Each structure stands twice: as structure tokens, then as C-alpha cells.
Amino acid sequence: MEPILLKSISKKFRKPLLKLNIFLINDTEVKETLFSSNTRFFVFFRWMNLFFSFVALVPVIASIVNFNLPHFLGYLLSFLLIDFIWVFEWVTKSTIFEEIRFFSIMQITLHSFFGVWLRFYDNYPIFDDILHITGGMWLVSFLFPLVLGSELVWSRNISRTLLFKIFIYMFSIVAMMGVFWEIGEFASDLIFSGYEGYRFAQEGLIDTMSDLIENQIGAVIGLFLFWKTLNKLNKNRDIYNLLEKISLALRRFFQQ
């Protein structure tokens, strides 16, 4: 039986998506997590991801009860980003590793639920610095498998040149996302500066530059740790083959 989600997609895409869905479901390797092929490991992270996805909904509901427009919009955006992580996988029929999904959901939840709603940003100034560093690491962990997988589609030769190109890609993407984040904070401060109870996201040039630098520090740490981890994992599992399959699934989807 076709998945319910496919019924809402135009007939032009339903057939190729269904074929792709069947291919990935029947491929046992693609269903594995990144760090382990143990089923219990996968189930644990799946339930943790579902739990914290609902935790991110708590501030949204709370901000409706005690309505605060800028906070409500921020909480809602965070919750929608978490939803996007799930929907992206369902629609494209590709794979997001459960550990990386957990890192993604936790990064967003730490910002919205702990940082803003529980006021960790106000009570613990170092909390913002930590999140910017882990934010750079998170972007690397989320995007690195996709970037590496797309490169492996064209070449299975893991050369220094290929690695340097991927590292430049990732470092640039993190820098770009960091700039967009700071622009968002700047725009938010301008729009809601006169709103009662609004907490300014930026506290001057030093704060902005520190955030951008911390993002890149996190990216460098993330690239180093992720590459070391992949090399260790590849000794027991064909990680490169796994990443290539995921990339091919995405490529086939977007080419339809």
C-alpha cells in the first residue's frame, strides 16, 4: 500500500517516489544509524527524538496562554524547524541518521526551551557561547554526510583534494548560516525593540563578532571529530557506500 503522504503529491511524482521508497525500505544498510547497526541503539534515539520534538512544543503553547508575540514567533519557528527535519526525510525518502537528528533537535530545543523559555540566556551568559560553538558542530554533522555523499557519487577516491574541497564547502556553509542568523537577530531587535518584555538578541559589535567566531570554531571542531569518526566506523562498515546511497536517493528525487 502506498504511504499516505504520497497521496497528497501530484501524480507526476507519486510513481518515482514510490519506487524510491521501496528501494530504501528494502535496503537494510540505509536503515542503520551512523554509529551502530544495533536495533536497540536506533530505537533509543528514535524515542528520544520524538520526546524532545514534543518538548519544543511546550513553549509554543505557553506563549499562547501568556501571549508574547516575539517569543511566540521564535518558539513557533523553532518547532517548525524540528518538524522540517522529520518531513524532509519523509518526503525525499532519504535517511537522516538518528544520532544526527537527535543533535539537531537538541540544538533547537536548547535554544527555544532552555535558552529563551527557561531563561538560560539571562541566567547563564556562557550558555549562548556554548550554543554557538555546538551550533557550528551541529551544522557540520547535519550537512557533512550529504556533501560527502554527493561527492562520492562522482568519485569513490577519497583524496586529499576531495577532502579539502569538502572542508571548504562546510566551513563556508557554516559561515553563511552564521551570518544569516545574525541578520535575523538584528532584524528581530529592530522590529520588536519597543515590545514590552522583549529580550534583545544582540548586545553590540563584540557580541555579534564573538558569535560568528564561535560558529567557525565549532565548525573546525566538528569537521575534525566527524572525519575521525567516519574513518573509525569505516573499518567495520562501508560508511562511504551508505552515504553514497543516501545521496543517490536525494539526487533521484530532485531530478524527477
Image (spheres, grey):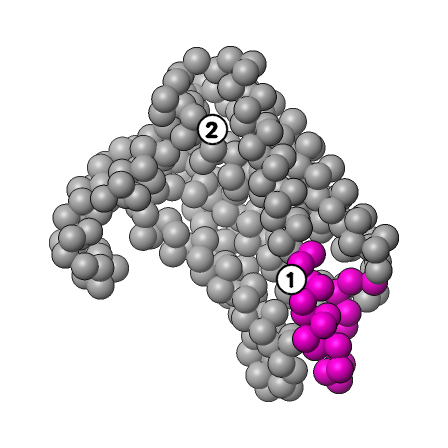
**Between 135 and 13, the one nearer to me in the picture:** 13
Q: Give the x, y percent position of residue 71.
A: 65, 75
Q: Tag 1: Cα neighbours inside 10 Å, few (<14), some, or many (≥20)?
A: few
Which quadrant would the C terminus be assigned to in this image? top left
Which quadrant would the N terminus be assigned to in this image? bottom left
Q: Give the x, y percent position of residue 48.
A: 51, 53
Q: Is residue 29 visible?
A: no
Q: Give the x, y percent position of residue 110.
A: 66, 58
Q: Is residue 187 magenta?
A: yes
- Dividing the picture into quarters, in which one does residue 16 lie? top left
Q: Secondary structure at mark 1?
A: helix
Q: What residue does disc 1 label?
A: 184
Q: Amino acid at mark 1?
A: Gly
Q: Secondary structure at mark 2?
A: helix
Give the residues in magenta: 182-203
Q: What residue does disc 2 label?
A: 148
Q: Is residue 59 left or right of residue 114?
A: left
Tell me what residue is drawn at x 22 percent, y 63 percent: 8
Of badges 2 and 1, nearer the viewer stands 1
